[in-house]
Image (cartoon, rainbow, N blue to C red):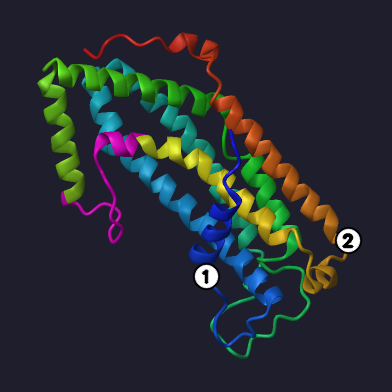
C-alpha cells in the first residue's frame, strides 16, 4: 500500500480543513493548531456518517436480501455486523475523549486560548487520536473477509446481469434503492444509494484513515511554541514520534488487507447466488 502523494495530502489539508476564523491572527502557528482541531472534528463527523451508511446498507439491503436466502449476502451481513460493532466502539471511545477537551477555536472573540493542555488540538490529544485510529478501528480479518465477499458478489452480479439471469434479484435491488431514495436517506448529502456504491463504502473507508493519519503527521511534524507550553509531562517530540508510529501501523494494516492470499477466507467459499 503506497502512501498518498505529498501534494494530495497538502491539498486535502488546505481545501478541506479551512483556515482559522478571521477574528484570530492568521499566523502559521495558529493556522496549524486550527487545522488540527478541524481534522479531529472531521474524523468524528466522518466516522458518524460512516456508521450511518453501514447501518443503512445493513437495514436497507443486507437484511432484506439475507431473508431471501441469498447466501453470499448473508455472509456479508455477518461481517458488516462485526465491523459495525468495532466502529461503534471506536466512535464511543473518541467521543468520550473529545468531551473531556475544549475547542481552542470557536466563534467568540472573548475566548482566551490560555495554556491549558486539555485543548482538542493539543499535541498529546493528536497522539491519542492517532493511536486510536491505528489500533481500534480496522480489524484486518474483518476487512479482508469483507473485501473478499464484496469482490465475489460483485462478479456474480455482473455475470448474472450479462447472462440475463435472476431478474428477480435485480428488480429487488432497484426497488430497495428507490425506497431508500424516497426516504431521503442522508439528507442533505447527495449519495449514490445503489447496491454497488453502498457495498463499496467500507472498501474506500479503510484508506480514509491513512489520509487522516498522513494529515496528522503533516500538521504535527513542526512542534510549535504552544506545544512546548502545553507539554508538561514529556517532551513534545515524543508525541510526534507516536503519531508517526501510528501512521506506519496503518500502512501495515492496509498491506495485510490487500494481500493476494485469501487463505484466511477459505471458510467463506461462495455458492452461486440462488
Per the image, label 1 sits on a secondary structure element best described as loop
Please provide percent x and percent y for residue 170.
15, 27
Label 2 vs label 1, nearer the camera: 1
Q: Which quadrant: the C terminus?
A: top left
| Residue placed under numbered mark 1 in the picture | 18
Q: Residue at x 88, y 59 (%)?
A: 235
The Cα atoms of the two marked residues, 2 and 1, are separated by 31 Å
Side (left or right) of 39 relative to 239: left
Q: Which mark is residue 233?
A: 2
Magenta part of the chain? 182-199
Q: Earlier in the sequence, mark 2 or mark 1?
A: 1
Residue 232, percent from left and from top = 87, 66
Magenta highlight on residue 184:
yes
User: Within 10 angstroms of label 1, few (less than 14), some, or many (20 or more) residues?
Assistant: some
The quadrant where residue 67 appears = top left
Compared to 71, does 192 lie above or below? below
Q: Secondary structure at mark 2?
A: loop
- Say above or below: 229 vs 100: below
- Does residue 99 appear in this view? yes
Q: Residue at x 41, y 52 (%)?
A: 49
Query: Which of the pair 22/179 is nearer the observer?
Result: 22
At 76% from the left edge and 63% from the top edge, which residue is drawn? 222
- Image quarter in which the N terminus is found: top right
Amino acid at each position: 500500500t503506497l502512501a498518498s502523494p505529498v501534494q494530495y495530502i497538502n491539498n486535502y489539508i488546505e481545501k478541506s480543513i479551512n483556515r482559522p476564523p478571521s477574528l484570530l491572527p492568521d499566523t502559521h502557528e495558529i493556522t496549524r493548531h486550527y487545522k488540527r482541531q478541524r481534522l479531529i472534528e472531521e474524523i468524528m463527523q466522518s466516522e458518524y456518517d460512516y456508521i450511518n451508511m453501514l447501518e443503512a446498507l445493513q437495514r436497507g439491503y443486507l437484511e432484506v436480501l439475507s431473508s431471501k436466502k441469498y447466501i453470499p449476502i448473508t455472509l456479508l451481513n455477518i461481517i458488516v455486523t462485526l465491523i459495525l460493532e468495532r466502529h461503534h466502539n471506536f466512535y464511543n471511545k473518541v467521543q468520550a475523549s473529545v468531551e473531556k477537551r475544549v475547542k481552542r477555536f470557536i466563534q467568540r472573540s472573548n475566548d482566551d486560548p490560555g495554556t491549558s493542555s486539555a485543548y482538542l488540538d493539543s499535541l498529546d490529544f493528536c497522539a491519542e487520536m492517532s493511536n486510536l485510529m491505528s489500533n481500534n478501528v480496522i480489524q484486518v480479518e474483518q476487512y479482508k473477509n469483507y473485501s473478499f465477499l464484496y469482490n465475489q458478489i460483485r462478479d456474480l452480479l455482473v455475470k448474472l446481469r450479462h447472462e440475463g439471469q435472476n431478474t428477480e434479484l435485480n428488480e429487488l435491488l432497484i426497488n430497495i434503492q428507490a425506497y431508500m431514495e424516497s426516504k431521503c436517506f442522508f439528507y442533505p448529502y447527495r449519495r449514490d444509494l445503489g447496491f454497488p456504491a453502498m457495498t463499496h463504502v467500507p472498501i474506500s473507508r479503510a484508506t480514509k484513515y491513512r489520509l487522516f493519519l498522513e494529515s496528522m503527521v503533516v500538521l504535527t511534524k513542526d512542534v510549535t511554541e504552544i506545544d512546548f507550553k502545553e507539554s508538561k509531562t514529556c517532551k513534545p517530540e515524543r508525541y510526534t514520534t507516536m503519531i508517526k508510529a501510528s501512521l506506519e501501523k496503518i500502512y501495515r494494516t492496509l498491506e495485510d488487507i490487500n494481500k493476494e492470499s485469501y487463505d484466511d477466507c477459505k471458510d467463506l467459499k461462495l455458492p452461486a447466488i440462488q
